[in-house]
Amino acid sequence: MNRADDHQPLTDSRVARLLPPTRALEKDAMKSVIKLDPHNPSGEGLESWAVIPPSFLTGPTPIQRGYKAFERNGLCTGTWDCSGGSSTGLNPYPLFEFMLLIEGHVGIIDETGHKEVISAGEPFFLPQGLNCAWDMPVYYRKYFINLFNDEYPAETDPSKLRVVRPLPNISEDDCKETSLSTLEPHQARHLAYESGDGRIQVGTLISGPCRCDITDFSRSELICMLEGSVRVTTSNGEEAFHAGDSFFAPLNAPVGWHADKPFRAFFCAVWP
């Protein structure tokens, strides 16, 4: 169904209608690694967020809720859910967003009519500018990290304007064969997406046993553990993350890593 404003420019006011309201965050959240919670670590449950504007919908208006674990300079991460039973029309996606579905399933439809179906446990990434529609037949819940900042221009490379699906079972040999960077100590990243300037990266991290001293983190990064475990040290102490956990490390937070055994994770990283 065509809507009158489907192809209008993505102005700040249009994007604001799709995003939840901002709120103040404690300063400690800027300094620590934050474990995402499927409900809300405060115990208060997910907050009701503004309804999706009817002009974006081709079905009933769903109920959306969420909580923000961190927000700064147009970058936000947290948990979001939606009642489902609806869909949207084709619109240029207004921001960069990496998501890990933790309940339900959704479909993302491109302008050719092709639909990518994402199920619980699977990650996906939508670049800003991708012309797409959402099919939301059932209730679903996700972890997310999104970015809306004029310093990060929308994607224009046609080959990158697609639904990005990081691969869980990629091997280090695959990383080498695709000429992607290898990091020390004994870590490899398979990039499913990289922006033209290299400041936004999405993919799969493969790590052997490692120990990295505390240093100021060079990027903002959401890490979704697939296999193994890692102990992360910050100014607030040490916390262990295991398969199934997702956590966020803010830019410039003092962070150290320690893993006795190999681990694997999905990631979305944003450099300044």
Image (cartoon, helix red, strand yellow):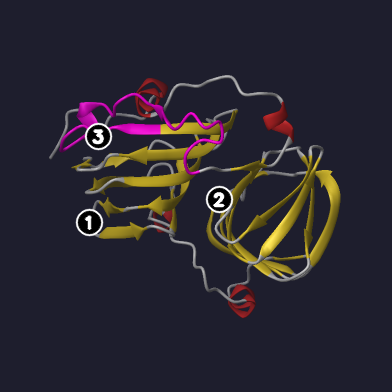
Q: Nearer the viewer, mark 2 or mark 3?
A: 3
Q: 10 Å neighbourhood of mark 2: few (<14), some, or many (≥20)?
A: few
Quadrant where the C terminus is found in the figure:
top right
SS class of the residue under badge 2?
A: loop
What is the x, y in percent for residue 258?
Answer: 79, 59
Determine which residue is flagged by label 3: 62
Q: Residue flagged by tag 3: what amino acid is it?
A: Pro
Instruction: Name the one closer to the observer, 86 or 188.
Output: 86
What is the x, y in percent for residue 144?
Answer: 48, 43
Determine which residue is flagged by label 2: 196
Q: Which mark is residue 112?
A: 1
Q: 10 Å neighbourhood of mark 1: few (<14), some, or many (≥20)?
A: few
The residue range painted magenta reads 38-65
Q: Is residue 42 above or below residue 229?
A: above
What is the x, y in percent for residue 223?
Answer: 60, 52
Q: Is residue 61 magenta?
A: yes
